[in-house]
Image (spheres, rainbow, N blue to C red):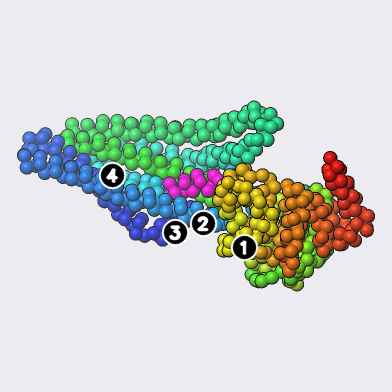
Amino acid sequence: MLKTFWNYIKKHPLAYGIATCFALVSSGLTLVPNLMIQKFIDAIVVNNLSRDNLWLYLSIFFISVICIYVVDVIWVVTLFSQSYQYQSELRNKVYKKLLHLRTPFYERFRSGDLMTRMTSDIDYLGDTIGYGFMLIVSNVTWTVSILTIMIVTTSWQATAVSILPLVLFGYIVFKLWSKIDVLYENNRDSVAKLSNEVLEMVDGVRVMRAYGKKELEQARFQERTSQVLKKANNLVVYNGSIGQVAKLLTGLSMGIGLTYSGYLVSQGVMTLGQLIAFQIYLGMLSGAVWGLSDIVLVYQQGNVSFRKIDELLTAEDSLEKNGQATIESIEHIEFTDYAFNYPTSDETTLKKIDFSLKRGETLGIVGKTGSGKTTLVRQLLRQYPVGASGEININGRPIQAYSVKNMEGLIGYVPQEHILFSKTVGHNIRFGNNSATDLEMNAAIASADFSIDLVRMADGLETLIGEKGVSISGGQKQRVSIARALIRQPELLVLDDSLSAVDAKTERAIINNIREIRQDKTNVIVTHRLSAVAEADKVLVLEDGEIIEAGTPSELLANKGWYYEQYMTQQMEVKESENI
Ligand SMILES: Nc1ncnc2c1ncn2[C@@H]1O[C@H](COP(=O)(O)OP(=O)(O)OP(=O)(O)O)[C@@H](O)[C@H]1O
C-alpha cells in the first residue's frame, strides 16, 4: 500500500509539497504561543515585565495563533481535496476494470461485496492517503519539534524521564498492530455480507411476502446484524482499550513530568516559567502521541481496504489471453467435436458439439430445460474460457484468435433474463446503438412489435421504466431488449429464450420481421416454443449437453424423435387453447 501511495504522491508533487511545507510551518508556529507564555511568566517572577515587553509577547502570541489557523486551513484543504481526487481516480479505474472483467469473475464475487469495495473501501483508502498523511506529517513533525523545544528551552532530564510512559504506549500499539488488521478485516467482511443480504432482500421482497417468509427472513437478517455487531464490538473493545491505555500512560507521563520538574525548580535548575511551559509541552506531546496511535488504526483500516481493491485490480477472469485479430463480418461459424465445462464445475456441460452455420442462415436451438442451450450460445459470446476439447471456428479461424471487444461489437444478444436500466424506454433501446438515427430507432421498435405499446405509453419513448423495468410488463421488457439488439443491426443476432413472455401471435410477428430485415445476416434462436424456429434453416435438439437431433424443421418432424413429439404436444395445446 505504501508503495502505491508513494507513487501517487510523486505524481502530485505540488499538492503534497504544499501540504508538507505548510504542515512543517504550522508545527513550528504552534510552539510560539507557548514560548511567549513561558517568557511572560518568567518576566513576572523576576519582576521585569515592562509594558513594551507585554505588548511584544501579546502581539507575537496573537499573530502566531492567526498564522497557525491560516496555514492549517491551507494545508488541510489542499490535502483533503487531493484525497477526494484520489478516490475519484481510483473509482474510475476500478469501474473500468469491472467493465472489462467477464462472467467467471462475477460468479466469484457477490454484488454486495463489490458494492462495499466500490464505496467504503475506496473511501477508507482516500482517508488513509488524506487523513493518514495529515496525521503522519503533523504528528511526526509536531513530536520532533516539541521534543526539541522541550530539551532546548526547558530541561532535557525532565523530558527524558516523563516521555518513558509514552514510549511504552508506542510499544503497546506496535504489538497490537497485526491484531487490529484481522479485526478490521473481519468487521469489513461481515458488513459486505450484510450488503449482499440487503440486495437480495430488495430483489426478492415480493417472493418473500408471497411465500409468507417475512418473519423467517427478518430473523435471519437479525442474526446477520448481530454477527456484524459482534465483529464491530471486538473492534470497539480494541480501539477503546487503546484509548484508555493512552489516557493512563499520558496521565502518568504528566504526573512524572510535574513531580520531576517541580523537584528541578526547587533545586534552582528550572524556572517557574519553564515548569509551566514544560507541562504545556508535555500535554501537546501527549496529543501528538495519541495522533500517532491513530495512524495505526487508519493505516490498518486502509491496508485492509487496499487488499480488497488490489484484489479487484489484479483480478483475472480465467479467460485465456484473447487474440487481437479483427473481423468485419461473420461469414461462417463452425463447432467441431466441441466440449465445455463451467470453470466452477467438473461436469461436462457440452459434449460432441458439431454443426456449422453460414451467413444469412437462422439456427434454432431447442431441447429440454437444462440441456445446455444457453451454455452453447454463451460460447459464441466468449463469456467463459473456450472448452477443453474441440474447436469453434469463425470464418475459418479459432474464435480465440479474435479480439473479444471486436467480436462483441458484431453480436446482438438478448439474454433470458432481461437487463434493463432504470431510465427511459428510449434510453434502453438506444443503448444498443447510440448513433442510430430516428429512422433506425423506429425500424427497430417496429420489428420488435413494440410500436403499439409505445403509443399507449403516456410519455412514449420518454416513459421511465423503473428499476430493472418494474413498471412495464414481462413481454414489454422482452421486446425492449429485442429492439435494443436489433437497433445495432448485428452480424449475429442471438435470442436466448427471449420470446417466452409474448403470446404466439406477437412471437410470429417478431420472427417474421426478423426474417425479413435480416435476410443477409445470421440468427440464433434458443426457444422452448417450436413455432419460433418453424422457419429456421437448421434446428439442433440438445439433451444432456449433446446434439441428439439436427436438421431442418421438416427433417426433424420426419425423424419422429423428441422434436416431433414436442411439436405434436405444442400443436395440441394450441388447438385446446383456441377451443376454449
Ligand atoms: N454458471 C454456471 N456454472 C455451472 N453450471 C452451470 C452454469 N450455468 C448453467 N450451468 C449448468 O449447465 C447445465 C446447462 O444449463 P443451461 O442454462 O445451458 O441449460 P438450458 O438448456 O439453457 O436450460 P433452460 O432451458 O432451462 O434455460 C445445467 O445443468 C446448469 O445447471
Q: CA distance from mark 1 to mark 2?
A: 34 Å
Q: Secondary structure at mark 1?
A: helix
Frontmost residue, 273 versus 266? 273
Q: Residue at x 33, y 38 (%)?
A: 287
Compared across the picture, whether 343 is left or right of 205 comes to right
**Amino acid found under the numbered disc labelled 4:** Leu
Label 3 sits on residue: 7
Label 1 sits on residue: 440
Instruction: Name the N-terminal-most of marks 1 and 2.
Output: 2
Decide if ligand 1 comes within 8 Å of the CB at mark 1.
Answer: no
Main secondary structure of the magenta stretch: helix
Residue 472 in the image, given as x and y percentages of width and height: 63, 45
Label 4 sits on residue: 147
Compared across the picture, whether 366 is left or right of 130 comes to right
**Is-magenta flag for residue 314?**
no
Q: Secondary structure at mark 4?
A: helix
User: Magenta span covers which residues?
Assistant: 113-128
Label 2 sits on residue: 93
Instruction: Name the N-terminal-most of marks 3 and 4.
Output: 3
